[in-house]
Amino acid sequence: MFEFFKKRGIVLVPTERVLLALWALLLSLDLGSVGEARTLTLEEYLNQVRSSNQSMKSANATIEATRQREYSSDLNTTPQVFGQVARSVDEKPPSSPLSGDKMEALSYSLGVQKAWSFGLQSQLTYNLSKIDIERENFPPFLAPGVVNPLVGLNDDSTKHWSEGRAQLDLVQPLWKNWMGREYDLTRETTQAKLSAQRQGEQYKVKALLAQAEFIYWQLALATDAVRTQESALVRFQKIRDWVKNRVNMSLADRADLLQAEAGLKARRFELELTVRDRVSLQRTFNSLRSQQGDRLEADVMPISSRMLSDMTMAAGAIKRLDIEVARSLEKVAASEVEQWREKFKPEVSVFGSYATNSRDESFGTAATDAFKADKPSMVIGVKFSTPLDRDLINRERSGLVKASEAARLDREQKEFNARQEWEDLVRQLSDAKTRLHLATEIESAQKQKLEYEKNRLERGRTTTYQILLFEQDYSSAQLGTIKAKADILGIIAKLKSFGDAA
């Protein structure tokens, strides 16, 4: 650099030399940092899929929703408060002299009711009413000397009064829903349905992450395949140039040059196909993290043969979420059978009611005296009901029993298929690792053979056809190694569908 300025007659003082050296150093560092591509690790990519993929977000939202709704069936036994305010006016023709020409009533009602987990239904209510009747006074005598017995009803207390009532009602089933059996079955069925839905979404998440990981490594192998084809193209280019020089010097036949040109064009064609495959994988790679296009801002990690050979799956992990879904659905079907049986059992219940009452001209006095037990009213009894069309009920129950049996058989078949698939995949993984080891050895042997044949070609001891053939064998061996890696990754992706949720 200093010679550049010296040739042009520019003399640099020591300070300028130091500044120029620092500037050159910084420039080299900047260029180095620009040329160095960032590597996107597998965990970083999976985190991007988790945070950006809409299907992943939907599945996670559904999983969280099922967890929050797990005890929704308990709403059947939660206490409820109710109330009412009503004003009524009755001016219809009186059915008796006491009814008067017009009656107005203002009533208030407030209460709480609860169904208990052991089947008891309870209700506590408080009612308060204010009643006004417009009625002419009764005459004192019906006839001369005959006193009217209704004269005593001319008092205002018979026309304007208030009533209060506090009442407790209890109903206890003795057959249907005994000890809250119907509530328990409803809770079990609801939880089993939510569990099946949650496990189905977890399986979807697990499958999506396994697919993302598989695409990540497939892209790494596709990048490796492109580099392999590019290296092969460079080697064929050198061979073609070397043969061309020999033909120009009349040291080789033109047929050798044509053969080298044909091999070079074949390598270019294969490189183009490999690049297209990689572009397609890049588009899928971006789609899984909800990005458009096929451009990548970072490289993926390369995968080595040793890394694949060391990959193992835990023994005894024959468990898959789709089987758990089938098990939950089997539980739902069994619970529905029990629910049907419980629903159409004869209903026998003991019920009772106890109320305290008050009546007074004063609205406030009637309201407070309603809780006094000096004027109680009580009811106790037993009620019974049962459906009569037992044939229809039995047919429906028979259908539910068959549906439950079908759910059981489906679960058993999925468990059998999972065991078979697991054993087959484990065997295939072992065979694929063996093939990878052999492919790696073949690649090494083909490379040694090619290097040796190149030395022979330089000494004129072999033909161009032979070196091109060996070059083709080495490229095929490299691609064979990549294919063996892809086979292992495909098997591992299927194995990842087993085990607990991710």
Image (cartoon, rainbow, N blue to C red):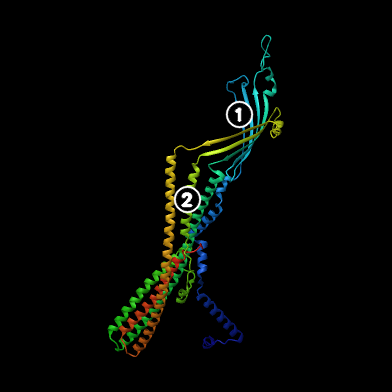
Residue 316 against residue 110 in the figure, above or below = below
SS at badge 2: helix
**Crowding near pointer 2: few (<14 within 10 Å), some, many (20+)?**
many
Residue 146 versus residue 475: which sits nearer the camera?
A: 146
**Farthest bottom residue in view:** 459
Q: Is residue 283 visible to the viewer in this orientation of the structure?
A: no
Which mark is in front, 2 or 1?
A: 2
Residue 411 versus residue 50: which sits nearer the camera?
A: 411
Q: Amino acid at mark 2?
A: Ala
Q: Position of residue 355 (x, y in %)?
A: 65, 34
Q: Position of residue 270 (x, y in %)?
A: 36, 74
Q: Is residue 238 visible to the viewer in this orientation of the structure?
A: yes
Inter-mark Cα distance, 2 to 1:
51 Å
SS at badge 1: strand
Number of numbered discs: 2
Q: Position of residue 161 (x, y in %)?
A: 68, 27
- Along the polypeptide, which appears first: circle 2 or circle 1? 1
For disc 2, the marked residue is 334
**Any mark on residue 88, and which?**
1
Q: Amino acid at mark 1?
A: Ser
Residue 228 relative to residue 95: left or right = left
The residue drawn where x is 42% and y is 61% is 416
Query: Which picture quadrant has residue 14?
Result: bottom right
**Any mark on residue 391, and which?**
none
**Farthest top residue in view:** 144
Residue 480 relative to residue 152: left or right = left
Residue 118 versus residue 366: which sits nearer the camera?
A: 118
Residue 342 against residue 59 in the figure, above or below = above
Query: Which picture quadrant has residue 77?
Result: top right
Query: Which picture quadrant has residue 228?
Result: bottom left
